[in-house]
Image (tube, rainbow, N blue to C red):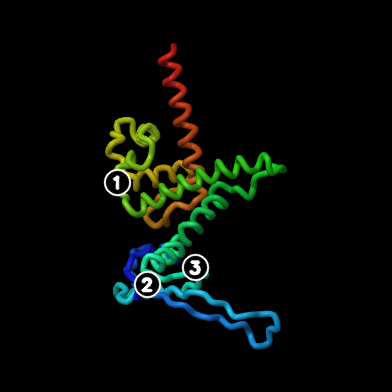
């Protein structure tokens, strides 16, 4: 055993997300080529085992067996490799948002010179929406203005209720209200908002906020 840490287990298939307290162990292993292979040769790698010795009642214990060519000779090395793999679900969510929400694969641009700037812009939007979703899931009662630009929070608050104090708007409610702008019904039996509704809602809110900002600027200049 080289150390202990905690990793986030993403929600999936009706299972709620949770933090798992895991133990990390590692050691060198040799992988031999199949006997029938004439060109294969043995590989010297490191195995990193990440396992949950005491899972919560009713939960399946988390266990990963990772192989890496990176030397793992200390607890810091082992925890670093485990941390990289723990980001897999976050990376998958990012690309899900980029493809499903931002619909990057459906763009009709025909040259790389035009497509590359668009992908760069949509990557920034996808990262922003992913951050909002994570904040709403992990700290739903946190003030929305801690996670989103206060001016944008104020715009959404006015859309919800002209008398609503933006400072009372939590990031959890902000997330749901953005999804509502995109078509999410937010009924009790409905699941969490999907990437399409969140993307459409964010797009609408951005346009509304920009119009509101330009109107205020014109009012000051006039």
Would you name the residue on which mark 2 appears?
Answer: 24
SS under mark 3: loop
Q: Quadrant of residue 61?
A: bottom left
Would you name the residue on which mark 1 appears?
Answer: 142
Looking at this view, name the residue that lies furthest to the top: 222
CA gap, disc 3 to disc 1? 39 Å
* Residue in the image at 52% along x and 51% along y: 97
Would you name the residue on which mark 3 appears?
Answer: 70
CA gap, disc 2 to disc 1? 32 Å
- At which x and y percent is residue 155? 39, 32
Q: Are marks 3 and 2 in contact (CB under 8 Å)?
A: no
* Residue in the image at 28% along x and 48% along y: 141
Would you say residue 55 is visible in this rendering? yes
SS under mark 1: loop
In terms of sequence position, does the residue under pointer 3 or pointer 2 come before the other? Answer: 2
SS under mark 2: strand
CA gap, disc 3 to disc 2? 16 Å
């Amino acid at each position: 055993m080289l150390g202990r840490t905690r990793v986030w287990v993403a929600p999936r298939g009706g299972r709620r997300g949770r933090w798992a307290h895991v133990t990390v162990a590692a050691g060198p292993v040799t992988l031999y080529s199949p006997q029938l292979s004439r060109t294969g040769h043995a590989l010297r790698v490191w195995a990193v085992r990440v396992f949950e010795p005491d899972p919560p009642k009713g939960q399946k214990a988390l266990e990963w067996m990772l192989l890496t060519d990176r030397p793992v000779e200390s607890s810091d090395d082992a925890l670093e490799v485990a941390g990289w793999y723990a980001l897999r679900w976050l990376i998958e969510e990012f690309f899900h948002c980029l493809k499903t929400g931002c619909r990057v694969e459906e763009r009709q641009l025909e040259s790389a010179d035009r497509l590359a700037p668009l992908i760069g812009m949509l990557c920034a939007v996808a990262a922003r929406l992913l951050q909002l979703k994570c904040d709403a899931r992990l700290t739903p009662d946190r003030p929305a203005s801690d996670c989103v630009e206060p001016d944008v929070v104020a715009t959404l608050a006015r859309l919800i209720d002209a008398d609503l104090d933006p400072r009372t708007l939590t990031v959890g409610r902000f997330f749901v209200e953005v999804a509502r702008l995109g078509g999410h019904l937010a009924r009790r039996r409905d699941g969490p908002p999907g990437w399409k509704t969140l993307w459409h809602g964010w797009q609408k809110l951005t346009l509304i906020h920009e119009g509101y900002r330009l109107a205020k600027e014109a009012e000051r200049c006039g």
